[in-house]
Image (spheres, rainbow, N blue to C red):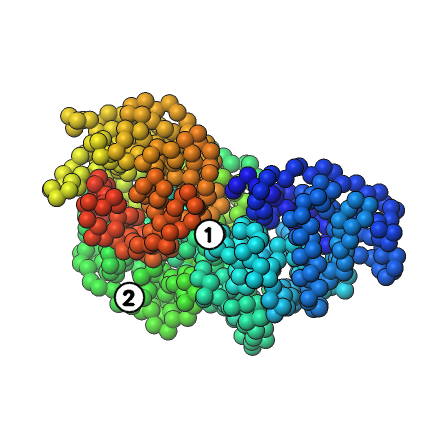
Amino acid sequence: MSAGVAHWTEEGASGESHGAGEDTSVTEIGGEVLVQASALELERGEVLAGRYQIEAVLGRGGSGIVLRAFDRVARVAVAVKILKPELATDPRWIERFSRELRLARQIQHPHVCRVFDIGQADGHWFITMELATGGTLRKQLAPDAGPRTSEERLADVRAVVEGLAAIHEAGIVHRDVKPDNFLRMDDGRLVLSDFGLATNPADAPAVSIMVGTPHYMAPEVVMGNVATPRSDVWSAGVVVHEILCGVRPPRWMPGRRTKTPVSSTSPRSPVLEACAVALAEDPDARPASAVELSVLIERAITSPSRFSLRTRRRGRTTLVWGSVAVATFGLIAVFGHRLWQPVAASSSSTAGAIGAIESVGTPRDWSVGATVLTTFAERVHCFDVLPGGQRARAIWGSPRRAEDIDLETGARSPSSIGTETYQVGCPALSPNGSTLLYPRISTSSSPEIVRARADGTDAVAITSGSEPHWLPNGDEFVFQLDDAHAALFSIPTMRYSLVANTAVEHWRHLHLMATSERGDTLALVYQGHELEQLLEVRSLPDLSLRSSWRLPGTVRGLEYFENELTLSHAAALERLDPRTGQSVRLARFSNGAIWAVSRLTNGDHLVLSRSTRQDVWMFPDGGPARALTVDGTSFAPTWSRRGGVLFERELPDGKYVIFALGEDGNAQQMTKGPFDGVPSFADGSDRWVYADYHRKAIVACLKERCSELLRSDELLDWPVMAPDENHVAFVSLAGIPHLRIADAEGKVTRDLGPTATECPPVWTSAASLWIFSGAGGRREWIEFNIDAAKKTGRTKAATAFNVDEARCGWENEPPSSPFYQHVRTVTHEDWKASRGRAFATLD
């Protein structure tokens, strides 16, 4: 933001203040920096303006305080919001106070807070309003606030949309709809307050550009567009979700390397269906105002099936990860006769009690003596043994195809399931083979789990989520509710229990799940920001936490055998005792990494292995392509018109470093690691930058000299230097991924809004930058003018983008284009399904 940005913490008439953070309202006022407001003290018993006798301080914020006072004239208790003296001399803040009174007086509604008067006395500007004795909605949504009935929550949902509808009917856009601004009155009413940011649409050009509270801002407002009733509707959708589910819809936070599954999870009760419409990414897909939203909500609440459920899901294995719009946030709880309550961790494991796993033993080479049943020339998205143990089902290739494999002969035949059952994720067949769960994308563009017959017919959506794993009883399954939470779903009751995410902030993405053969234990792997993972082991069905372990390396597969965990990673398959943390290295495949293991009914094991080669190739203008590397572990190349080539390489010890290709064709190591990546040349220059993920920094280099730490950022990716070398664009992954611009000294000068993270930005001039944006397979490039920090209106569809492989080039782009990728990563994959008695036991 510019130097004229001021932060205003909105207390509301209850006076509950919050520190700066994601719930803090932000107002871009412009002009000079406002001085730090000093403390404003009024003693109890003092009389303001000869009328309002001060009784108590209700709350403090950066702009003033809120007091409880007794109105001697009206003989009622009121709330008095007083602007701090040093701000009271600024006409912009006085106008904000006046606007709050002017707009609020237009509305008389039981769910809109009444504002009585504005005054100036004793050196203070103040407004008086209806007193909230029950605190804010934020307080009542706190984890320690205690349970509330469905009827109470539905009443609050009605109040939120009806209060907002009243101000929309008056032609007012609130622009800061959030739980902090809904107040509980003495008679139990919930009222919408705080019109300090509100505007009449006709006044919009004269007021702030960036206003509101970041987590409650509609996507188009975050991108810098003018707030409208439709953006208020989006904010109301977040609040309604929070009332019903206890949490806000999750933001999308993918990592470039981890490719953590992301789901926009939403239950399909009629009430939440209406809420999902309000959360549509496209403003035109939302109700035009809260008036229309209130009609949808009321119709849903009074629907006879208001407690019915439907489902959704993503994939069974980590071979697939869903992807949704950055700003299309689904709902993450199923609304049954009672709302979910977070499951507390058991007393056997406390926060911070994370053990270290000790690995011992030399793995056997299971590829010796193994029989290769079949091979796949393209990516295997899903692989699972079917009930009975005689066949396996593979979903592979692009476009996807489903095949069943005879585990005795290796014969393959097309699967009988419908194509719609495997287009998004991985279908899961119940233990008795009668019921299929599969994920699909709903009409509101969010994934949902569908229940169907074994062949995919008679499909009915039953819940939001992804990654369903059946329990042995066939009546329950665990699934991934959103990017951070797992849940246990009961088909007979159509309800689920949420697994409380007790992992510390560092591990926020749910990566893998597995259930024991007896169905009494659940294992979860959470992915950290770098190459770190956390294993949690929980009891079923109570979901209490048994133990937590920090995992070595990067685990790709997680399975239970005889109630002991097996972990698959690039080096070996390990057997882990989750009670002690002792791990034994069992096996490896000399010709590829073990990706998945299944034990068959006769004691044999079926192994899916994958060997991958990644090399850098040059695609010159009009000439034949040629390989620049042949080591099989090189990727993420960058090219300079002066002829330089840089790329990233994984070393045998697991470090990631940057190499440069010399004129003689030999590669020279440029950085030391342990986690350096995504180098980028300034166009036509010898200067380049890269991301040092270990130090969380952007490093600037000139040829082989890399000594300048350009910028530190807790979560950064894709640094790209401008052609004039005066700016660096990079992606900040803190919260919603944003594309930011830093100057030559590393100071952030521009925030260009949300971005997709699979592909780096592209400079086409010193002032023109193209940003990768969109969701799922619907990606596009958007041009920004960085001097104005605005879109130019030019876009280009990324028709060649593949969400599984992150192909960032534009289809049919000519070599003369600045977007043509002269150096590219070429990946070759070889998948094998093998079985044999050489690895029949895990002892």
The three-letter code of the residue at mark 1 reads: Met
Viewer-nearest residue: 21 or 537 = 21
Viewer-nearest residue: 840 or 538 = 538
Residue 559 on image: x %, y %: 38, 47
Residue 676 on image: x %, y %: 35, 31
Q: Is residue 209 left or right of residue 418?
A: right
Among the 4 quarters of the image, the one containing residue 743:
top left
Pointer 2 or 1: first along the chain = 1
Tell me the residue that label 2 is attached to.
Answer: 419
Tag in front: 2 or 1: 1
Q: Is residue 488 left or right of residue 674?
A: right
The three-letter code of the residue at mark 2 reads: Thr
Quadrant that contains the C terminus? top left
Question: What residue sits 58% from the left and 53% below the top?
Answer: 207
Q: CA distance from mark 2 to mark 1?
A: 37 Å
Question: What residue sits 31% from the left and 66% below the top?
Answer: 420
Tell me the residue that label 1 is attached to.
Answer: 223
